[in-house]
Amino acid sequence: MSELRAIQTKDACPVAGPYSQALLTPHALYISGQLPALPSGELPPGSIAYKTSLCIANLKAILSAAGSDISRVVKTTVFLTDMKDFAEVNKEYEKHFGVDGGLKPARSCVAVHQLPKGVEVEIECVALPGGGGGGQGVEESERRVLDH
């Protein structure tokens, strides 16, 4: 069995170019930047909070397809075309990451001039594989390693 596996799910926005939705390795799941799109690829109108929730829904779908979940995300990168949206994006983001006392992933937020398809937000992440137990979180032994 190969140590790399491409992850593809119809439950998330289709890719917009020559890349995978995600790559699963024995030690990490790397998820490509997710646009605020429906699984059909449609880019619906709405607030930046709604668009952020769509990006996160796509991340969750890919995490699930890979046998992981949002509680195992260790790093995110948020791309914004306008930092005036930072507070509203944060408000939506915190509804999904580190809930119920879980660890909040490390994060970068970067202002960019432009994003694919003219969207205002895109989110990518790196997660630990496995543990897709519906939000059980990082195991205590892994938590200690992550804390050091």
Image (cartoon, grey):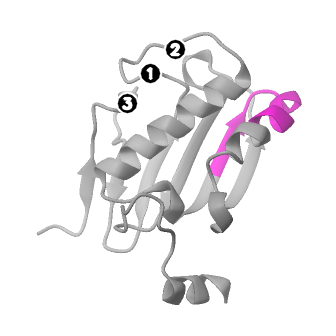
Give the CA separation, mark 2 to mark 1.
Answer: 7 Å
Q: Earlier in the sequence, mark 2 or mark 1?
A: 1
Q: Which mark is residue 43?
A: 2
Q: Secondary structure at mark 3?
A: loop
Amino acid carrying mark 3 in the image: Val
Answer left or right for 22 relative to 49. Answer: left
Q: Nearer the viewer, residue 114 or 5?
A: 5
Residue marked by disc 1: 38
User: On the rendered image, what quadrant is the N terminus found in?
Assistant: bottom left
Q: Residues within 10 Å of mark 3 (few under 14, many from 20)?
A: some
Q: Residues within 10 Å of mark 1 (few under 14, many from 20)?
A: some
Q: Nearer the viewer, residue 134 or 105?
A: 134
Give the CA separation, mark 3 to mark 2.
Answer: 13 Å
In contact (CB < 8 Å): disc 2 and disc 1:
yes
Measuring from the top left, give residue 88's x and y in whole percent: 81, 32
Residue found at x 71% / y 18%: 47
**In the rendered structure, which segment of residues is drawn in magenta?**
77-89
Residue found at x 44% / y 21%: 38
Residue marked by disc 3: 15
Note whether 138 is above or below 12 in the view shown.
Answer: below
Answer left or right for 5 relative to 30. Answer: left
Q: Residues within 10 Å of mark 2 (few under 14, many from 20)?
A: some
Q: Quadrant of residue 75?
A: bottom right
Q: Secondary structure at mark 1?
A: loop
Residue found at x 67% / y 45%: 95
Measuring from the top left, give residue 93's x and y in whole percent: 69, 43
Answer left or right for 5 relative to 84. Answer: left
Seen from this angle, which residue lies furthest top? Answer: 45
Q: Earlier in the sequence, mark 1 or mark 3?
A: 3
Amino acid carrying mark 2 in the image: Leu
Q: Quadrant of residue 144?
A: bottom right
Note whether 44 is above or below 131 in the view shown.
Answer: above
